[in-house]
Amino acid sequence: MQIGCPTEIKPQEFRVGITPNAAQEAVAHGHSVLIQKGAGVGAGFTDADYTAAGARIVDTAAEVFASADMIVKVKEPQAVERAMLRPEQLLFTYLHLAPDPDQTHDLLKSGATCIAYETVTDPRGGLPLLAPMSEVAGRLAPQVGAYSLQKANGGRGVLMGGVPGVGPAKVAVIGGGVVGTFAARVAAGMGADVTVLDRSLPRMRYLDDTFGTMFKTRYASAGNTAELVAEADMVIGAVLIPGAAAPKLVSRAQLSTMKPGAVIVDVAIDQGGCFETSRATTHQDPIYEVDGIVHYCVANMPGAVARTSTLALGNATLPFMLALADKGWRKACSDDPHLAQGLNVHAGQLTNAPVAEALNLTAITPEAAIAS
Ligand SMILES: NC(=O)c1ccc[n+]([C@@H]2O[C@H](COP(=O)([O-])OP(=O)(O)OC[C@H]3O[C@@H](n4cnc5c(N)ncnc54)[C@H](O)[C@@H]3O)[C@@H](O)[C@H]2O)c1
């Protein structure tokens, strides 16, 4: 198979869909790999790295789209990219179609088969191609929060770990899933006094069994949340109700109960955020203040560490990319029902029921698409 990887063109996106290591494995499996010139630069990979891995460099995205049987990317295709997709072509990338009717319309029109990273599942009910980015954002949250706590950035001027004779920062993490667990581990590792709030007792049992006294857990009742938010130097929002907008767990009125200069890092901002006062920000202008509380609400946090994020995403996508290339999408998806869950569009039809429901359209099943 010809596998193609264009340069990402979404603003501020520095990741790349295929790493040199992934290219090398694909070549070892007998495939050819086309990389657009400069595609890896933002993540620290040169064209020479790809050439050494056995890939071929081409100048333009148009050349990649014209020759590749499968396009592997990071972000959803932009309008100019969608216009280059062809029937029989396979697209493997993040799509997030539910809130995006324009993209959905264009992908349906293209006739291509589109597999979305975010809906591929695993046997434990997880989302294996979304988890690496939650791990990155979780680990990043205390890091950006600690920076925001510094006086020059509007924060309280509190050091995460304190020093001998001076207590540490208090950190409340709301939501103890992937983001929350990684955030709590890093914050505790920095020496902070950390409490994770969640509504799932099995999840809190798991955290308690696994991490012992590294951080505390509290049930996320409104009362407990209000108490911990008022005491905290830093609050990290990490809740998720799959498929739904994030619940607003901290009101604007509650900001007045917080310490002046305390920091909110709302990682759940990509689902609307779990603080009433959250609004999405960018890496250029990440922080703003409401009622004396510093807010960090960057919607694509992993972009800040494009190299780590590219490597983490590449580790997760590689086995699926190889299966798709080795077997073709039909056999790969019929052999692996979890990969089949990633099918979102095939030959002008939606193949994912929740996406169809969100957009008021109809869908066929992935099985029907595989059999067609
Ligand atoms: N901003 C970014 O760059 C970025 C990057 C990655 C992930 N995210 C977002 O971070 C959020 C968390 O992702 P995740 O992978 O950790 O999800 P997850 O499903 O692993 O964890 C979510 C946790 O929230 C808990 N929860 C749900 N409702 C709650 C409530 N009312 N109170 C307390 N806890 C509650 C759940 O029990 C679960 O443990 C998502 O919105 C995700 O999209 C954002």
Image: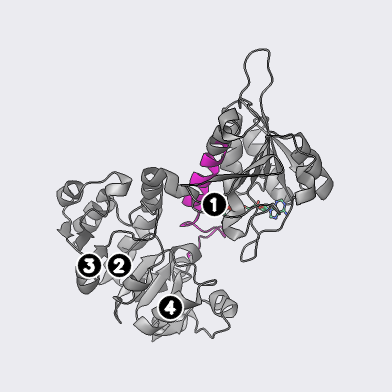
Q: Which of the pair 363/248 is nearer the observer?
A: 248
Q: CA distance from mark 3 to mark 2?
A: 8 Å
- Residue 291 position within the rendered picture, expressed as x and y whole percent measured from the top left: 72, 43
Identity of the amino acid at label 4? Val
Q: CA distance from mark 3 to mark 1?
A: 32 Å
Identify the residue under disc 4: 345
Nearest to N terminus: mark 3 or mark 1:
3
* Cβ–Cβ under 8 Å for marks 3 and 4: no
- Residue 227 position within the rendered picture, expressed as x and y whole percent measured from the top left: 81, 39
Indicate the quadrant where residue 259 lies.
top right
Nearest to N terminus: mark 3 or mark 4:
3
Q: CA distance from mark 1 to mark 4?
A: 31 Å
Is the CB of the residue bearing disc 3 within 8 angstroms of ligand 1?
Answer: no
Nearest to N terminus: mark 1 or mark 4:
1
- Of tags 3 and 4, the one toward the viewer is 3
How many neighbours does mark 1 have within 10 angstroms: few (below 14), some (14-19), or many (20 or more)?
some
Secondary element at image label 4 = strand
Q: Which of the pair 271/91 is nearer the observer?
A: 271
Q: Which of the pair 56/31 is nearer the observer?
A: 56
Give the numbered dot on residue 281: 1
Residue span colored magenta: 120-142
Q: CA distance from mark 4 to mark 2?
A: 14 Å
How many neighbours does mark 3 have within 10 angstroms: few (below 14), some (14-19), or many (20 or more)?
many
Query: Taking the image as drawn, is residue 128 in sight?
Result: yes
Q: CA distance from mark 3 to mark 4?
A: 21 Å
- Quarter of the image with the N terminus in it: bottom left
Is the CB of the residue bearing disc 2 within 8 angstroms of ligand 1?
Answer: no
